[in-house]
Amino acid sequence: MEDKLDKKINSKLYEALMTKDDEKVLDICAGLTKGPLHTVTIHEDTVIHIATYHKKTDLVLQLLNMVPHCDSHKLTWQNSSGSTILHETGTNNRMVDAAREMLRRAPMLLNMINKEGETALFYAARHGKTKPFKFLHDEVTRANQGPDLKIFLVRDDKSTILHLAILSKNYWMAHEIATKHTFLMKEKDEDQMTPLQLLSCRELNLCPTNFFKRMIYKLIDPNIEDTSLMLYPLKRMRKQKFACHWAVELIKLLVEHDTSWEDTESRTSKVKAKFHQYGKMSSSPQQLEEIERAIRLPDTPLLLATRHRCKKVVEAILEKYPQAIEHIDQEGRNILHVAILYRNHEVFDFVVDQKYAKERLRGKIDNDGNTLLHMVGEEIDDVDKDLKGPALVLQENMLMFQKVKDVCTTLDEFKLNSKSKTAQQLFYENNNKRRTEAKEWMIESAKNYTVVAVLIATVAFTAEYTVPGGPNPETGEPILKQKPLFKFFSIADAMSLSAALTAVIMFLNVITSSYRFKDFEKSLVRKLNAGLTMLMVSVAMLMVAFAVTLILTISGGRKWTKITLYAISFLPVIVFIFTYLETERTIILTMIREPRRMLKRMRSWFWNDKPKPAVWYSGQPSPSAHRA
């Protein structure tokens, strides 16, 4: 009977807490033996626990006042996970006043740990809440110094408060911790990961990609405190910029104290470079077995940042310690090996552009005899990667192969790895299945697009011979021929028909292609994109023709009706243009950049003062010969 009564009371209490009915909560607690310390959940949370978690500061203060001073020690009650009411204040920024009152009533709460070995300070850092962290940190440092302080900074599993602040993405807090407790910067958790290694595993989005957002982003001050007058989108951008600003500062600070790149493998590979498949294997089975048995330790921040596309960490390390570029991991791979394997183009380009870096790294092989070119044939599955058609992925791999080939030495093309394969053999073997998938994908896409293009061409052809207003019965000429808009209709319809037929030709060309590997590098995807672009132009022109027809046949009456008609007619065209430009932005930018690069190359070739090859002058003496 008593158990039933408790369940009924708990139901009422829980419902009142969820519905924010503070008066009801206080009334129920007043009639309970334990008052606000009554456990209301199956996890042994008290009423104060739940009220604190739900950010009800006023209610928490009233509940605390209901506890007699002689029972203040009862405030140290822990729920099933070992968390006290002070731990719960660390889950939000509005409970600092409540935390202050809790510590005034029961100071021992500050030292209490939950079942994961976390104090309230550690708990606040784990949740990334700045205000309770600042308050609790001041309280802790005021009351504890020296060895006694470590209990608040390190958890049972060796994770430090700095590790948790980084994982919670509160980089300002992490920077504060690293500045005030410098020894934590080199501490490792149970997985042997330092704070910088954890940070290197995060990709930092430092600036919006949208042009207008980027302009606004630059004008925002990330360090302002009062954001009450800011619109919600601006608040989000300020928060993002604040996080990025302190992430960069944290990276600089941690890099300054990190020299993990000095602990490197030998530059001499365990596998000798081979240029043919004959003779004995360069590594004995026993050696390979020893390599496989070796304990796999976490990579250094330099290589982790390369793998996880955190370019800022790579830049900071190489700016502070340029010699770190020669670091090699346990598998004998340098930074370029890792950048290629994980398709990190930004880091690859950055390293290759560094002075002397290309010459120092390009000819190296890993423990399996893989050159940089071999790495293009390998690929790591990435769940976060954008989903693309297999043809586009294969094209990217082909372009990557050519890009790396331009960096490597000529001999790298002929080197065999430990499986006696050249880079090209490995690439073709690992991408052969994808080529089959890409062929099927392209044929299917081209067929579907062809059907749409033929339908548009049919409509455009029909519209050309059934002109708006109809023909003159006597002359056979269009009645509306003299109107200026009729010319727009004719041009738009003709362009739509022409573009649709051109698209059909391009798609048929794709369907009948041979689908060799080199075809995927440029020609096939270009043809498909060109056909798709012509199809989009055809649709756009058909929309224009429709809009003009509507205006020609219905226009008349008052001025406002004309304006409305114009707006309705051209709305589909405007929507189409914006959606198409957003979707095909990458293709359009590539089409714009390619001629620029060609012009830049030609200009550097013609106006460069460096001596040209003798063949350039077609038998005439070179300028340098004249100068001599």
Image (spheres, rainbow, N blue to C red):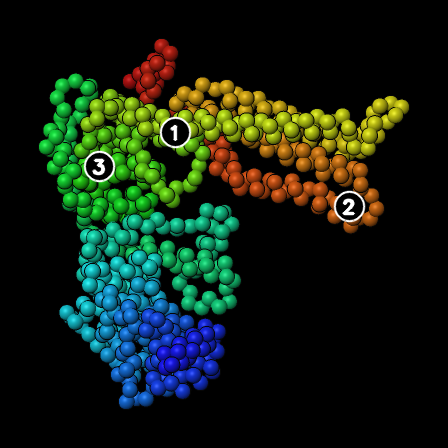
Please report the residue visible at 34 percent of the width from the left and 77 percent of the height from the top: 39
Which residue is drawn at the image coordinates 70% and 25% (left, top)?
Answer: 461
Badge 3 amino acid:
Arg
Image position of 114 (left or right of 206): left
Residue 559 in the image: state x and y as whole percent.
80, 48
Q: Amino acid at mark 1?
A: Arg
Quadrant for the N terminus, please. Answer: bottom left
User: Residue 434 shows which numbered tag?
Assistant: 1
> Type of residue at label 2?
Lys
Residue at mark 1 to residue at mark 2: CA–CA distance: 55 Å
Query: Eyeballing the image, is 585 above or below 271?
Result: below
Locate residue 173, reporting x and y percent. 31, 63
Q: Which-is-in-front pick, marks 1 and 2? A: 1
- The residue labelled by disc 2 is 562
Residue 179 can be seen, yes or no: no
Element class at badge 3? loop
On screen, residue 377 versus residue 187, left or right, reads right
Rendering coords of residue 425 (x, y %): 29, 23
